[in-house]
Image (cartoon, rainbow, N blue to C red):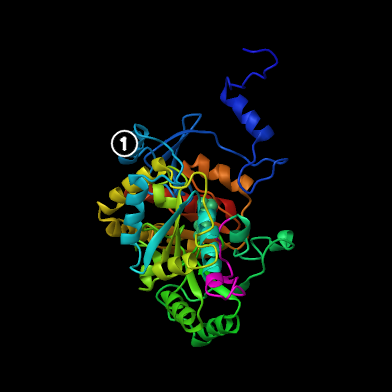
Protein backbone atom coordinates (compact mmCIF):
# COMPACT_ATOMS: atom_id res chain seq x y z
CA UNK A 1 0.00 0.00 0.00
CA UNK A 2 1.33 3.47 -0.82
CA UNK A 3 2.25 5.53 2.23
CA UNK A 4 -0.24 7.95 3.82
CA UNK A 5 -3.20 6.24 2.27
CA UNK A 6 -6.19 5.56 4.50
CA UNK A 7 -6.86 1.82 4.57
CA UNK A 8 -10.34 0.88 3.32
CA UNK A 9 -12.54 -0.29 6.17
CA UNK A 10 -13.65 -3.91 6.01
CA UNK A 11 -16.19 -5.17 8.53
CA UNK A 12 -15.05 -8.27 10.41
CA UNK A 13 -18.43 -8.87 11.99
CA UNK A 14 -22.08 -8.01 11.60
CA UNK A 15 -21.86 -5.95 14.81
CA UNK A 16 -19.09 -3.89 13.30
CA UNK A 17 -20.86 -2.75 10.18
CA UNK A 18 -24.00 -2.13 12.17
CA UNK A 19 -21.97 0.16 14.38
CA UNK A 20 -20.71 2.00 11.28
CA UNK A 21 -24.30 2.27 10.16
CA UNK A 22 -25.32 3.92 13.45
CA UNK A 23 -22.36 6.28 13.25
CA UNK A 24 -22.48 7.34 9.63
CA UNK A 25 -25.51 6.22 7.67
CA UNK A 26 -28.65 8.22 7.15
CA UNK A 27 -31.76 6.12 6.55
CA UNK A 28 -34.96 7.32 4.81
CA UNK A 29 -36.91 9.92 6.77
CA UNK A 30 -34.76 9.13 9.81
CA UNK A 31 -32.81 10.99 12.45
CA UNK A 32 -29.03 10.75 12.30
CA UNK A 33 -28.50 11.54 15.97
CA UNK A 34 -31.25 9.30 17.26
CA UNK A 35 -30.96 6.49 14.73
CA UNK A 36 -33.96 4.19 14.21
CA UNK A 37 -34.04 0.49 15.05
CA UNK A 38 -32.68 -1.37 12.01
CA UNK A 39 -32.77 -5.03 11.11
CA UNK A 40 -29.69 -6.39 9.33
CA UNK A 41 -30.69 -8.23 6.17
CA UNK A 42 -28.26 -10.57 4.43
CA UNK A 43 -30.39 -11.98 1.65
CA UNK A 44 -33.82 -12.28 0.13
CA UNK A 45 -35.41 -15.02 -1.92
CA UNK A 46 -38.96 -15.48 -3.15
CA UNK A 47 -41.21 -13.70 -0.67
CA UNK A 48 -38.76 -13.88 2.23
CA UNK A 49 -36.14 -11.53 3.65
CA UNK A 50 -33.34 -13.23 5.58
CA UNK A 51 -31.88 -11.49 8.62
CA UNK A 52 -28.27 -11.93 9.77
CA UNK A 53 -29.35 -14.17 12.65
CA UNK A 54 -30.98 -16.55 10.16
CA UNK A 55 -34.59 -15.49 10.79
CA UNK A 56 -36.78 -15.30 7.72
CA UNK A 57 -39.54 -12.73 7.32
CA UNK A 58 -42.51 -12.83 4.94
CA UNK A 59 -42.24 -9.58 3.02
CA UNK A 60 -45.44 -7.54 3.08
CA UNK A 61 -43.96 -4.44 1.44
CA UNK A 62 -42.45 -5.59 -1.88
CA UNK A 63 -39.63 -3.20 -0.96
CA UNK A 64 -41.98 -0.23 -1.38
CA UNK A 65 -44.20 -1.52 -4.18
CA UNK A 66 -41.35 -2.66 -6.39
CA UNK A 67 -40.45 -6.36 -5.92
CA UNK A 68 -43.62 -7.69 -7.54
CA UNK A 69 -42.03 -11.00 -8.63
CA UNK A 70 -40.26 -11.52 -5.31
CA UNK A 71 -36.51 -11.63 -4.72
CA UNK A 72 -33.86 -13.52 -6.69
CA UNK A 73 -36.40 -14.28 -9.35
CA UNK A 74 -34.74 -16.74 -11.77
CA UNK A 75 -36.02 -14.96 -14.91
CA UNK A 76 -34.86 -11.55 -13.74
CA UNK A 77 -31.53 -12.90 -12.49
CA UNK A 78 -31.01 -14.48 -15.89
CA UNK A 79 -31.81 -11.24 -17.71
CA UNK A 80 -29.34 -9.34 -15.52
CA UNK A 81 -26.60 -11.91 -16.09
CA UNK A 82 -27.19 -11.97 -19.83
CA UNK A 83 -27.01 -8.17 -20.07
CA UNK A 84 -23.79 -8.10 -18.01
CA UNK A 85 -22.16 -10.10 -20.83
CA UNK A 86 -22.71 -7.08 -23.10
CA UNK A 87 -22.58 -3.90 -21.01
CA UNK A 88 -23.98 -2.70 -17.73
CA UNK A 89 -24.01 0.94 -18.72
CA UNK A 90 -23.17 3.33 -21.52
CA UNK A 91 -24.19 6.96 -21.90
CA UNK A 92 -27.49 7.58 -23.71
CA UNK A 93 -26.44 10.81 -25.40
CA UNK A 94 -25.55 9.97 -29.02
CA UNK A 95 -25.73 6.23 -28.33
CA UNK A 96 -28.67 3.88 -28.25
CA UNK A 97 -29.27 0.22 -27.49
CA UNK A 98 -31.86 -2.48 -27.94
CA UNK A 99 -32.87 -2.91 -24.27
CA UNK A 100 -33.99 0.74 -24.02
CA UNK A 101 -35.72 0.80 -27.42
CA UNK A 102 -37.59 -2.43 -26.65
CA UNK A 103 -38.63 -1.18 -23.24
CA UNK A 104 -39.96 2.11 -24.63
CA UNK A 105 -41.85 0.31 -27.41
CA UNK A 106 -43.40 -2.02 -24.85
CA UNK A 107 -44.39 0.81 -22.53
CA UNK A 108 -46.03 2.63 -25.42
CA UNK A 109 -47.89 -0.55 -26.41
CA UNK A 110 -49.09 -1.26 -22.86
CA UNK A 111 -50.16 2.24 -21.81
CA UNK A 112 -53.16 4.18 -23.25
CA UNK A 113 -53.02 4.71 -27.01
CA UNK A 114 -52.47 8.48 -26.78
CA UNK A 115 -49.05 8.05 -25.14
CA UNK A 116 -46.34 7.62 -27.75
CA UNK A 117 -43.05 9.08 -26.47
CA UNK A 118 -40.96 7.89 -23.55
CA UNK A 119 -38.33 9.67 -21.51
CA UNK A 120 -36.39 7.24 -19.30
CA UNK A 121 -34.96 8.36 -15.97
CA UNK A 122 -33.46 6.90 -12.82
CA UNK A 123 -36.13 7.25 -10.17
CA UNK A 124 -39.76 8.07 -9.60
CA UNK A 125 -39.09 11.55 -8.28
CA UNK A 126 -37.06 12.37 -11.38
CA UNK A 127 -39.83 10.98 -13.61
CA UNK A 128 -42.16 13.46 -11.89
CA UNK A 129 -39.66 16.30 -12.38
CA UNK A 130 -39.53 15.35 -16.04
CA UNK A 131 -43.34 15.36 -16.29
CA UNK A 132 -43.51 18.83 -14.71
CA UNK A 133 -40.78 20.17 -17.00
CA UNK A 134 -42.59 18.70 -20.02
CA UNK A 135 -45.82 20.48 -19.05
CA UNK A 136 -44.05 23.81 -18.48
CA UNK A 137 -42.01 23.58 -21.68
CA UNK A 138 -45.16 22.69 -23.60
CA UNK A 139 -47.02 25.85 -22.57
CA UNK A 140 -43.92 27.95 -23.00
CA UNK A 141 -43.66 26.70 -26.56
CA UNK A 142 -47.34 27.52 -27.10
CA UNK A 143 -46.63 31.15 -26.15
CA UNK A 144 -48.25 30.81 -22.71
CA UNK A 145 -45.29 30.86 -20.30
CA UNK A 146 -47.57 32.04 -17.46
CA UNK A 147 -49.09 28.53 -17.48
CA UNK A 148 -46.46 27.11 -15.13
CA UNK A 149 -48.42 26.06 -12.03
CA UNK A 150 -49.79 22.67 -11.12
CA UNK A 151 -52.98 21.62 -9.48
CA UNK A 152 -52.42 18.68 -7.14
CA UNK A 153 -54.61 16.79 -4.68
CA UNK A 154 -54.39 16.90 -0.91
CA UNK A 155 -52.95 13.65 0.49
CA UNK A 156 -50.95 13.23 -2.70
CA UNK A 157 -47.37 12.03 -2.85
CA UNK A 158 -45.14 12.52 -5.88
CA UNK A 159 -41.58 12.23 -4.59
CA UNK A 160 -38.88 13.98 -2.63
CA UNK A 161 -37.04 16.25 -5.05
CA UNK A 162 -38.00 19.93 -5.04
CA UNK A 163 -40.33 20.00 -8.03
CA UNK A 164 -42.05 16.78 -6.99
CA UNK A 165 -42.14 17.76 -3.31
CA UNK A 166 -43.96 20.99 -4.16
CA UNK A 167 -46.87 18.87 -5.45
CA UNK A 168 -47.05 16.65 -2.34
CA UNK A 169 -49.60 17.34 0.39
CA UNK A 170 -48.40 20.61 1.99
CA UNK A 171 -48.97 19.33 5.54
CA UNK A 172 -47.51 15.82 5.37
CA UNK A 173 -44.85 17.15 2.98
CA UNK A 174 -43.85 19.79 5.58
CA UNK A 175 -43.94 22.56 2.97
CA UNK A 176 -43.43 25.31 5.54
CA UNK A 177 -39.83 24.15 6.03
CA UNK A 178 -39.12 24.87 2.39
CA UNK A 179 -41.57 27.71 1.78
CA UNK A 180 -38.91 30.14 0.50
CA UNK A 181 -37.81 27.86 -2.29
CA UNK A 182 -40.82 25.72 -3.18
CA UNK A 183 -43.01 26.90 -6.04
CA UNK A 184 -46.57 27.45 -4.81
CA UNK A 185 -49.12 25.28 -6.49
CA UNK A 186 -52.90 24.92 -6.20
CA UNK A 187 -54.27 22.13 -3.99
CA UNK A 188 -57.69 20.58 -4.42
CA UNK A 189 -59.34 18.58 -1.63
CA UNK A 190 -58.60 14.85 -1.69
CA UNK A 191 -61.36 12.78 -3.31
CA UNK A 192 -63.79 11.37 -0.74
CA UNK A 193 -65.81 8.67 -2.51
CA UNK A 194 -64.20 5.21 -2.67
CA UNK A 195 -63.97 3.09 -5.84
CA UNK A 196 -67.38 1.98 -7.07
CA UNK A 197 -69.20 4.92 -5.52
CA UNK A 198 -70.43 8.00 -7.34
CA UNK A 199 -69.04 11.22 -5.89
CA UNK A 200 -71.43 14.04 -5.01
CA UNK A 201 -72.01 16.42 -7.92
CA UNK A 202 -71.01 19.44 -5.79
CA UNK A 203 -67.63 17.83 -5.12
CA UNK A 204 -66.95 17.38 -8.84
CA UNK A 205 -68.28 20.87 -9.59
CA UNK A 206 -65.93 22.30 -6.98
CA UNK A 207 -62.96 20.56 -8.63
CA UNK A 208 -64.04 21.85 -12.03
CA UNK A 209 -64.41 25.35 -10.65
CA UNK A 210 -60.87 25.28 -9.22
CA UNK A 211 -59.44 24.20 -12.53
CA UNK A 212 -61.49 26.81 -14.40
CA UNK A 213 -60.48 29.63 -12.07
CA UNK A 214 -56.81 28.78 -12.36
CA UNK A 215 -56.72 27.79 -16.02
CA UNK A 216 -54.62 30.78 -17.12
CA UNK A 217 -51.76 29.83 -14.81
CA UNK A 218 -52.15 26.03 -14.74
CA UNK A 219 -49.78 23.94 -16.85
CA UNK A 220 -51.18 20.65 -15.60
CA UNK A 221 -53.15 18.73 -13.05
CA UNK A 222 -51.03 16.04 -11.39
CA UNK A 223 -52.51 13.14 -9.45
CA UNK A 224 -52.09 9.50 -8.48
CA UNK A 225 -54.98 7.71 -10.20
CA UNK A 226 -57.34 5.66 -7.95
CA UNK A 227 -54.79 5.02 -5.18
CA UNK A 228 -53.14 7.79 -3.19
CA UNK A 229 -50.05 6.02 -1.85
CA UNK A 230 -47.52 7.42 0.60
CA UNK A 231 -49.71 10.48 1.29
CA UNK A 232 -52.43 8.45 3.00
CA UNK A 233 -53.08 5.07 1.34
CA UNK A 234 -56.52 6.16 0.14
CA UNK A 235 -58.57 4.66 -2.68
CA UNK A 236 -61.02 6.75 -4.69
CA UNK A 237 -63.69 6.52 -7.36
CA UNK A 238 -62.78 6.42 -11.06
CA UNK A 239 -65.50 9.06 -11.59
CA UNK A 240 -63.07 11.71 -10.35
CA UNK A 241 -60.57 10.76 -13.03
CA UNK A 242 -63.23 10.91 -15.73
CA UNK A 243 -64.43 14.31 -14.49
CA UNK A 244 -60.92 15.75 -14.18
CA UNK A 245 -60.01 14.52 -17.68
CA UNK A 246 -63.04 16.44 -18.98
CA UNK A 247 -62.19 19.60 -17.02
CA UNK A 248 -58.61 19.49 -18.31
CA UNK A 249 -59.89 19.23 -21.88
CA UNK A 250 -62.46 21.98 -21.36
CA UNK A 251 -60.06 24.45 -19.80
CA UNK A 252 -56.85 23.70 -21.71
CA UNK A 253 -54.81 22.10 -18.94
CA UNK A 254 -52.59 19.02 -19.32
CA UNK A 255 -53.22 15.96 -17.17
CA UNK A 256 -50.31 14.11 -15.52
CA UNK A 257 -50.93 10.68 -14.02
CA UNK A 258 -48.36 9.51 -11.52
CA UNK A 259 -48.62 5.70 -11.82
CA UNK A 260 -45.32 5.11 -10.04
CA UNK A 261 -47.03 3.13 -7.26
CA UNK A 262 -50.13 1.94 -9.13
CA UNK A 263 -48.48 0.75 -12.35
CA UNK A 264 -47.88 -2.85 -13.46
CA UNK A 265 -50.96 -4.53 -12.10
CA UNK A 266 -51.05 -3.51 -8.45
CA UNK A 267 -54.65 -2.22 -8.60
CA UNK A 268 -55.99 -5.10 -10.70
CA UNK A 269 -55.50 -3.24 -14.00
CA UNK A 270 -52.12 -2.92 -15.67
CA UNK A 271 -52.37 0.84 -15.06
CA UNK A 272 -54.88 2.47 -12.72
CA UNK A 273 -56.16 4.88 -15.38
CA UNK A 274 -57.78 1.85 -17.03
CA UNK A 275 -60.33 1.79 -14.19
CA UNK A 276 -61.63 5.05 -15.67
CA UNK A 277 -60.98 4.24 -19.31
CA UNK A 278 -59.15 7.53 -19.81
CA UNK A 279 -55.69 8.58 -20.87
CA UNK A 280 -53.50 11.25 -19.32
CA UNK A 281 -51.33 13.52 -21.50
CA UNK A 282 -48.27 12.59 -19.45
CA UNK A 283 -47.73 9.47 -17.34
CA UNK A 284 -45.00 8.54 -14.87
CA UNK A 285 -44.03 4.95 -14.08
CA UNK A 286 -41.30 3.61 -11.79
CA UNK A 287 -41.12 1.39 -8.72
CA UNK A 288 -42.22 -2.05 -10.09
CA UNK A 289 -40.81 -1.28 -13.56
CA UNK A 290 -37.72 -3.45 -12.97
CA UNK A 291 -39.47 -5.82 -10.58
CA UNK A 292 -37.56 -4.08 -7.80
CA UNK A 293 -34.08 -4.94 -9.08
CA UNK A 294 -32.73 -1.52 -10.01
CA UNK A 295 -33.87 2.06 -9.89
CA UNK A 296 -35.54 2.97 -13.16
CA UNK A 297 -38.48 5.16 -14.11
CA UNK A 298 -40.06 6.59 -17.22
CA UNK A 299 -42.25 9.50 -18.25
CA UNK A 300 -44.53 8.95 -21.23
CA UNK A 301 -46.30 11.69 -23.15
CA UNK A 302 -48.60 12.18 -26.10
CA UNK A 303 -47.44 13.12 -29.57
CA UNK A 304 -49.05 16.53 -29.10
CA UNK A 305 -47.00 17.21 -25.95
CA UNK A 306 -43.79 15.96 -27.59
CA UNK A 307 -44.36 18.03 -30.72
CA UNK A 308 -45.31 21.11 -28.76
CA UNK A 309 -42.12 20.93 -26.72
CA UNK A 310 -39.87 20.38 -29.72
CA UNK A 311 -41.40 23.24 -31.70
CA UNK A 312 -40.62 25.64 -28.86
CA UNK A 313 -37.70 27.96 -28.17
CA UNK A 314 -35.34 25.26 -26.92
CA UNK A 315 -36.27 22.85 -29.73
CA UNK A 316 -35.40 19.96 -27.42
CA UNK A 317 -36.54 18.63 -24.09
CA UNK A 318 -34.21 20.06 -21.46
CA UNK A 319 -33.22 17.02 -19.44
CA UNK A 320 -30.64 14.23 -19.58
CA UNK A 321 -29.54 12.18 -16.57
CA UNK A 322 -26.09 10.55 -16.57
CA UNK A 323 -27.55 7.09 -16.10
CA UNK A 324 -30.43 7.58 -18.51
CA UNK A 325 -31.58 4.37 -20.18
CA UNK A 326 -29.23 2.16 -18.16
CA UNK A 327 -29.09 -1.07 -20.24
CA UNK A 328 -28.93 -3.37 -17.24
CA UNK A 329 -32.05 -1.83 -15.71
CA UNK A 330 -33.85 -1.80 -19.08
CA UNK A 331 -33.07 -5.48 -19.70
CA UNK A 332 -34.41 -6.42 -16.31
CA UNK A 333 -37.50 -4.26 -16.88
CA UNK A 334 -38.09 -6.09 -20.17
CA UNK A 335 -37.80 -9.45 -18.40
CA UNK A 336 -40.13 -8.24 -15.65
CA UNK A 337 -42.79 -7.23 -18.18
CA UNK A 338 -42.44 -10.57 -19.99
CA UNK A 339 -42.83 -12.43 -16.72
CA UNK A 340 -45.83 -10.39 -15.62
CA UNK A 341 -47.69 -10.68 -18.92
CA UNK A 342 -46.93 -14.37 -19.36
CA UNK A 343 -49.26 -15.23 -16.48
CA UNK A 344 -52.88 -14.67 -15.56
CA UNK A 345 -51.88 -11.77 -13.33
CA UNK A 346 -55.43 -10.36 -13.16
CA UNK A 347 -56.71 -13.56 -11.56
CA UNK A 348 -53.75 -13.51 -9.19
CA UNK A 349 -54.34 -9.91 -8.09
CA UNK A 350 -58.04 -10.77 -7.59
CA UNK A 351 -56.95 -13.73 -5.45
CA UNK A 352 -54.68 -11.50 -3.34
CA UNK A 353 -57.43 -8.89 -3.00
CA UNK A 354 -60.03 -11.35 -1.75
CA UNK A 355 -57.54 -12.89 0.67
CA UNK A 356 -56.58 -9.45 1.99
CA UNK A 357 -60.25 -8.53 2.46
CA UNK A 358 -60.87 -11.72 4.37
CA UNK A 359 -57.59 -11.80 6.29
CA UNK A 360 -57.56 -8.18 7.45
CA UNK A 361 -61.27 -7.75 8.21
CA UNK A 362 -60.97 -9.08 11.81
CA UNK A 363 -58.96 -5.89 12.54
CA UNK A 364 -62.17 -3.89 12.15
CA UNK A 365 -63.35 -5.07 15.55
CA UNK A 366 -60.21 -4.02 17.41
CA UNK A 367 -60.72 -0.87 19.49
CA UNK A 368 -58.31 1.78 18.19
CA UNK A 369 -58.65 0.69 14.56
CA UNK A 370 -60.30 3.43 12.49
CA UNK A 371 -60.66 1.67 9.14
CA UNK A 372 -59.70 -1.41 7.16
CA UNK A 373 -59.66 -1.12 3.37
CA UNK A 374 -58.32 -3.16 0.48
CA UNK A 375 -58.00 -2.50 -3.22
CA UNK A 376 -56.22 -4.75 -5.70
CA UNK A 377 -53.12 -6.19 -4.02
CA UNK A 378 -53.09 -3.46 -1.36
CA UNK A 379 -54.40 -3.87 2.18
CA UNK A 380 -54.58 -1.05 4.74
CA UNK A 381 -55.38 -0.99 8.44
CA UNK A 382 -55.73 2.60 9.59
CA UNK A 383 -55.41 3.19 13.32
CA UNK A 384 -56.86 6.10 15.28
CA UNK A 385 -53.42 7.16 16.51
CA UNK A 386 -50.00 7.14 14.89
CA UNK A 387 -48.06 4.01 15.82
CA UNK A 388 -44.88 4.04 17.87
CA UNK A 389 -42.46 2.50 15.40
CA UNK A 390 -39.88 1.60 18.02
CA UNK A 391 -42.47 -0.66 19.65
CA UNK A 392 -44.44 -2.07 16.74
CA UNK A 393 -41.63 -2.66 14.22
CA UNK A 394 -39.76 -5.25 16.37
CA UNK A 395 -43.06 -7.02 17.09
CA UNK A 396 -43.74 -7.62 13.41
CA UNK A 397 -40.22 -8.98 13.06
CA UNK A 398 -40.66 -11.26 16.09
CA UNK A 399 -43.77 -12.61 14.37
CA UNK A 400 -41.82 -13.30 11.19
CA UNK A 401 -43.32 -10.65 8.90
CA UNK A 402 -41.92 -7.49 7.35
CA UNK A 403 -44.39 -4.60 7.63
CA UNK A 404 -43.31 -0.98 7.70
CA UNK A 405 -46.11 1.29 8.97
CA UNK A 406 -46.12 5.06 8.71
CA UNK A 407 -48.17 7.32 10.92
CA UNK A 408 -51.56 5.72 11.53
CA UNK A 409 -51.23 3.37 8.58
CA UNK A 410 -50.29 -0.28 8.82
CA UNK A 411 -50.42 -1.60 5.28
CA UNK A 412 -49.25 -4.29 2.92
CA UNK A 413 -48.68 -4.60 -0.80
CA UNK A 414 -47.06 -8.04 -1.01
CA UNK A 415 -45.10 -9.49 -3.94
CA UNK A 416 -47.55 -10.98 -6.46
CA UNK A 417 -45.89 -14.40 -6.02
CA UNK A 418 -46.99 -14.65 -2.38
CA UNK A 419 -48.65 -18.03 -1.78
CA UNK A 420 -52.09 -18.41 -0.20
CA UNK A 421 -50.47 -19.85 2.88
CA UNK A 422 -47.93 -17.03 3.20
CA UNK A 423 -50.58 -14.38 2.69
CA UNK A 424 -52.81 -15.97 5.27
CA UNK A 425 -49.93 -15.93 7.75
CA UNK A 426 -49.08 -12.34 6.85
CA UNK A 427 -52.65 -11.10 7.40
CA UNK A 428 -53.12 -13.09 10.57
CA UNK A 429 -49.89 -11.77 12.09
CA UNK A 430 -50.60 -8.18 11.04
CA UNK A 431 -53.93 -8.35 12.85
CA UNK A 432 -52.54 -10.09 15.94
CA UNK A 433 -49.62 -7.65 16.33
CA UNK A 434 -52.05 -4.72 16.06
CA UNK A 435 -54.37 -6.36 18.55
CA UNK A 436 -51.52 -6.78 21.06
CA UNK A 437 -50.19 -3.32 20.39
CA UNK A 438 -53.55 -1.65 21.00
CA UNK A 439 -54.46 -3.64 24.10
C1 LIG B 1 -42.53 6.37 -4.67
C2 LIG B 1 -43.29 7.37 -5.43
C3 LIG B 1 -42.66 8.44 -6.08
C4 LIG B 1 -41.18 8.69 -5.95
O1 LIG B 1 -40.41 7.68 -6.48
P1 LIG B 1 -38.87 7.49 -6.02
O2 LIG B 1 -38.38 6.37 -6.85
O3 LIG B 1 -38.93 7.18 -4.55
O4 LIG B 1 -38.19 8.78 -6.30
C5 LIG B 1 -43.44 9.31 -6.81
N1 LIG B 1 -44.77 9.13 -6.91
C6 LIG B 1 -45.41 8.11 -6.31
C7 LIG B 1 -46.88 7.96 -6.50
C8 LIG B 1 -44.70 7.20 -5.55
O5 LIG B 1 -45.35 6.19 -4.94
Q: Is residue 150 magenta?
A: yes
Q: Residue 298 location in percent, x, y?
A: 44, 55
Classify residue 265 by image quadrant.
bottom left
Query: In the rendered image, which quarter contains the N terminus?
Result: top right
Specify whether 334 is left or right of 284: left
Q: Residue at x 63, y 63 (%)?
A: 166
Prevailing secondary structure class for the magenta stretch in the rendered image: loop
Q: Residue 396 location in percent, x, y?
A: 52, 45
Specify whether 155 is left or right of 44: right
Q: Residue 248 location in percent, x, y?
A: 48, 78
Classify residue 207 by image quadrant.
bottom right
Q: Residue at x 62, y 24 (%)?
A: 16
Query: In the rendered image, which quarter contains the C terminus?
Result: bottom right
Specify whether 52 is left or right of 338: right
Q: Secondary structure at mark 1?
A: helix
Which residue is labeled 1 in the image? 78
**What segment carries the magenta color?**
139-159
Amino acid sequence: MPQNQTPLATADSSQQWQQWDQQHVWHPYASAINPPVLFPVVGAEGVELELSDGRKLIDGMSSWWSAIHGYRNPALDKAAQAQLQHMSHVMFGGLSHEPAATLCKRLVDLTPAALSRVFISDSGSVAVEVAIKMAIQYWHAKGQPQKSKLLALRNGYHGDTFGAMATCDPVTGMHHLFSDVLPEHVFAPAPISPPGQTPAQEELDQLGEMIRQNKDTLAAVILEPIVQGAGGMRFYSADYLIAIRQFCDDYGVLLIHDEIATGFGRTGKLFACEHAGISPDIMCVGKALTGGYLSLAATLCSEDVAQGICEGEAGVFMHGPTFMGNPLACSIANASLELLLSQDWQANIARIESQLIEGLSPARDIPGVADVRCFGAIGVIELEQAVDMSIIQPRFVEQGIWIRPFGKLVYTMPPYIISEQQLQTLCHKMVSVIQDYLS
